[in-house]
Image: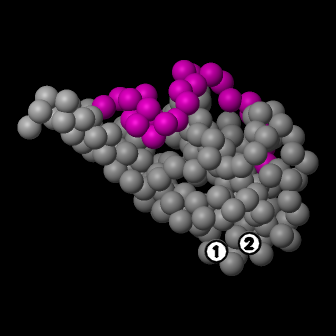
Amino acid sequence: MSRPLVTALMLTLLAVAPAAGATVDELAGALNLVPLHGAVPPSFALERLADGKTVALSSLQGRPVLVYFWATWCPYCSRELPSTIEQVHREFGPRGLAVLAVNMEESREKVRAWVNDRKLTMDVLLDISGAVNGAWGVAYSPVVFVIGRDGRLVARAIGTRDWTAPEGRAFFEALMAR
């Protein structure tokens, strides 16, 4: 085999199978996430769709958090949220990952019907006024922010990702271990 072919094959394998012991930042890079290097996220307290109780981001300190900004009209969200994001919640939620699906400026009734139809089990939060997505600089959907146990931002994703692929699972494993 030629040297360029071997190099290309090795780079492909590294992109597909994350190296053992890779850092969260390295794994975030494999998912094309934008590193945020420990910035403090804007605080929020939003109503949970399921029971009307308020969920404050500050109450999740000590847990890694995935904040998923979405809307029912977003075709990408309609595919990703009930599949891969729900799977991440089911797989990593019992181990401590908080998954918050923040709906962007839609009515409770519309969101409730959409969520019930897709049988989502994660916390769905209502940002009816749009104040939270504005504070976070979210102008389109989906947008994902990942927060570490220390309450600081780790990374951001604009658009969809295959969160349940080996790279995604490795990223969440490393995040959970951090």
x, y percentage for residue 41? 68, 29
Q: Is residue 167 above or below residue 111?
A: above
Q: Is residue 65 visible?
A: yes
x, y percentage for residue 135? 81, 33
The residue singled out by tag 1 in the image is 118
Q: Front-most of 65 and 24?
A: 24
The residue singled out by tag 2 in the image is 114
Residue 127 falls left or right of residue 38: right
- Label 1 residue SS: helix
Contact flag, marks 2 and 1 (Cβ < 8 Å): yes
Residue at the limit of the structure toward the bottom, as seen here: 117
- Local crowd size for mark 2, using a 10 Å CA cut-off: few (<14), some (14–19), many (≥20): some
Residue 71 falls left or right of residue 86: right
x, y percentage for residue 35? 53, 27
Residue type for callout 1: Arg
Residue type for callout 2: Trp
Residue at the limit of the structure toward the right, as seen here: 129
Q: Is residue 60 visible?
A: no
Q: Front-most of 121 and 77?
A: 77
Residue drawn at 62 percent across, 75 percent down:
119
Residue drawn at 24 percent across, 42 percent down:
13
Segment tinted magenta in the rendering:
22-49
- Label 2 residue SS: helix
Residue 143 falls left or right of residue 18: right
Q: Front-most of 106 and 15?
A: 15
Q: Quadrant of the C terminus?
A: top left
